[in-house]
Image (cartoon, rainbow, N blue to C red):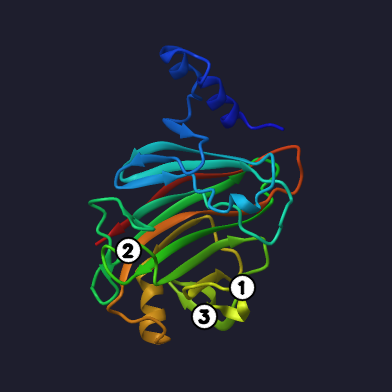
Amino acid sequence: MHHPLRNALLRLSAACAILMFMALPAAYASSSCSDFAQIDAAPYYVYNNTWNLGNAGSGYWECVYSNGLSGGSLGWGTEYYFPDVNPYDVKAYPSVVLGWQYGYVYNNTGLPVKISAGDNIESTLQWSENGTNTGQVDVSYDNWIISSTNASAPTAEMMIWTYNDIGGQYGENEGSVTIDGISWTFVYRPINYNGTGNTWPVFSFVSNPNNSSNQTLNLKDFFNYIAYTKGLLNSSLYIGGVEFGTEVFYNTNTKDSGALNVQKYNAVVN
């Protein structure tokens, strides 16, 4: 199994401080293979979010790295391997986070902000999938809606799938809508949809077809569509956090890892 980032990190534990520094791959300013590790890149942080390890099986691994900020944009990525176990369950969501994430708020991000406020959330991204074994994944934004600025749990969730190879989101297909010049399928999953036990509603925009890996979106347009066009969100709620990453279900063979390389990413509240 070929995973150079993980191998490089494992070598660090056996070296002294100078050798540890030299063992890091030259392309990565910071990296970690620890579950739930955070790499600061203010106003963002890169999050090694392996949130569903109970369904991951044995032999999994996931690493994240940051190349730091340049011209206001962050370069970062992830490399991972998850065996073909419980194939319909998301295992992890390595991502970059702006603002609120389950009660933790990174300061000086412009978030949380009310949906009714006039602020835009402009985001530009450029990404590619690397390696020979990306497996079953989507590449997506995950956005959290909260009831107050100090909320400990979300009120609702909004996903924007810029790419998917798993067939689409689970929920009620509400038809197509064009936002920011791109056609999306809008999918609504109410609380406890079909007895699944989800405790908050999930709104998803699935690219139709898969979009370019170079995009500029105003994320506020998606929130406005849900709140004002569909009437499914109260506009007095807060946009708490914005994340961008990849939901990993599993890898399709055992010979290589999957990887997402984000050459350029930003999300700015203005």
Instruction: Tell me residue 93's x, y (percent).
Output: 53, 52
Q: Are marks 3 and 1 in contact (CB under 8 Å)?
A: no
Residue type marked 2 = Ile
Q: How many marks?
A: 3
Q: Residue at x 46, y 31 (%)?
A: 28
Above or below residue 117? Residue 133 is above
Point out the image quarter for the C terminus.
bottom left
Label 1 crowd bin: few (<14), some (14–19), many (20+), radius 10 Å = few
Residue under label 3: 190
Instruction: Tell me residue 244's x, y (percent).
Output: 46, 55
Above or below residue 41? Residue 95 is below
Residue under label 1: 170
Q: Which mark is residue 199?
A: none
Which quadrant of the structure image shows residue 1?
top right
Q: Residue at x 51, y 72 (%)?
A: 205
Mark 3 → mark 2, Cα distance in angstroms: 25 Å
Under circle 2, the secondary element is strand
Of circles 3 and 2, the one toward us is 3
Label 2 crowd bin: few (<14), some (14–19), many (20+), radius 10 Å = some
Of circles 3 and 1, the one toward us is 3
Residue type marked 3 = Pro
Mark 2 → mark 1, Cα distance in angstroms: 26 Å
Under circle 1, the secondary element is loop
Front residue of this view, candidates 249 and 177: 249
Instruction: Tell me residue 223's x, y (percent).
Output: 38, 74
Under circle 3, the secondary element is loop
Q: Decide which of tag 3 and tag 2 comes sooner along the chain.
A: 2
Residue under label 2: 121
